[in-house]
Amino acid sequence: MGTVGDAVAATATIKEQNGNNSADKKPTVIFVLGGPGSGKGTQCANIVKFFGYTHLSAGDLLRAEIKSGSENGTMIQNMIKEGKIVPSEVTIKLLQKAMQESGNDKFLIDGFPRNEENRAAFEAVTKTEPEFVLFFDCPEEEMERRLLGRNQGREDDNIDTIRKRFKVFLESSLPVVEYYNAKGKVRKIDAGKPVEEVFEAVKSIFTPKDEKVKHRLCYLLGIQGTVVKSECRTWYTENTD
Ligand SMILES: Nc1ncnc2c1ncn2[C@@H]1O[C@H](COP(=O)(O)OP(=O)(O)OP(=O)(O)O)[C@@H](O)[C@H]1O
Ligand SMILES: Nc1ccn([C@@H]2O[C@H](COP(=O)(O)O)[C@@H](O)[C@H]2O)c(=O)n1
Ligand SMILES: [Mg+2]
């Protein structure tokens, strides 16, 4: 398992390769975490449509790296088959490249950071803290059912690797969620529900408070026949700064 020492070494290597980018404007980053099969990719696709973020899945980037025939391909493939976490240096380089190429400045980084080494190296290299962490909380039996039914030809969607991935999630990834929770940055979603219901909860996290007020007011004004104007005023006073 990677240590904080490894993370510092990875940071030094990436800095050497990238030069000093400290003058660059920092992007908005949201980390999307949750167990394997909790629905991170599914919900990120919805968030992209509604809120204009660029979705970067660390797992997808690693799988694309294998397909590209890169020198790291075999190592990455073996790690994924075993449900292990690829060294941060490799994953962060892929993330940084994808961020630069996107032309966007708002990112959903899905499935990263997966362990303490990922977290420390990303912050050290990019000097970027996430705006918040969207955490999909889902029972293990439900995640197992979803992964076994996913049918996308993923080499790690078999029961042996799934069990290894669950273990890594509990031992290495949950502590990262706890780290951000202690900083008040975690927005937890009950991800065991149907896709549409989960997205309703996600939307309310991404929708600014004044937008929520506007939507509610429009709703109340739309049914004015049954809801009197004074009730609208009371609601508005109670729900605005
Ligand atoms: N809320 C849901 N209810 C039922 N099925 C779902 C739900 N969300 C996603 N799924 C399905 O579960 C499977 C896994 O979803 P998804 O790929 O989004 O998970 P993930 O968290 O990205 O998983 P991984 O970490 O393995 O990449 C997919 O087949 C998807 O269609
Ligand atoms: N930060 C990460 C993210 C993923 N991996 C490896 O990829 C596998 C699949 O990831 P998904 O998010 O697509 O489920 C994962 O099990 C790891 O082997 C990684 O190393 N580091
Ligand atoms: Mg995914």
Image (cartoon, rainbow, N blue to C red):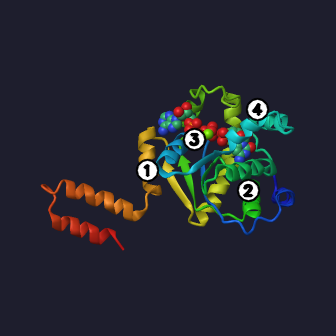
Q: Label 1 crowding class (10 Å Cα cut-off): few <14, some 14-19, many 20+?
A: some
Q: Which residue is mark 4?
A: 67
Q: Label 2: which residue?
A: 116
- Look at 66% across and 47% down and name the residue there: 170
Q: Which residue is mark 3?
A: 41
Total marks placed: 4
Q: Is mark 2 within 8 Å of ligand 2?
A: no
Whether residue 111 is visible here, answered yes or no, is yes
Q: Residues within 10 Å of mark 2 (few under 14, many from 20)?
A: many
Disc with the residue nearer the chain's start (2 vs 3): 3
Q: Is residue 37 left or right of residue 6?
A: left
| Dot 1 or dot 4, earlier in sequence | 4
Give, as a three-letter code, the residue at label 2. Answer: Glu
Q: CA distance from mark 1 to mark 4?
A: 35 Å
Percent coordinates x, y for residue 205 in the rendering: 46, 56
Q: Residues within 10 Å of mark 3 (few under 14, many from 20)?
A: some
Callout 2: SS: helix
Query: First in sequence: mark 1 or mark 2?
Result: 2
CA distance separating discs 2 and 4: 27 Å
Q: Does the beta carbon of the residue at mark 3 sit less than 8 Å from ligand 1?
A: yes
- Which structural element holds mark 3? helix
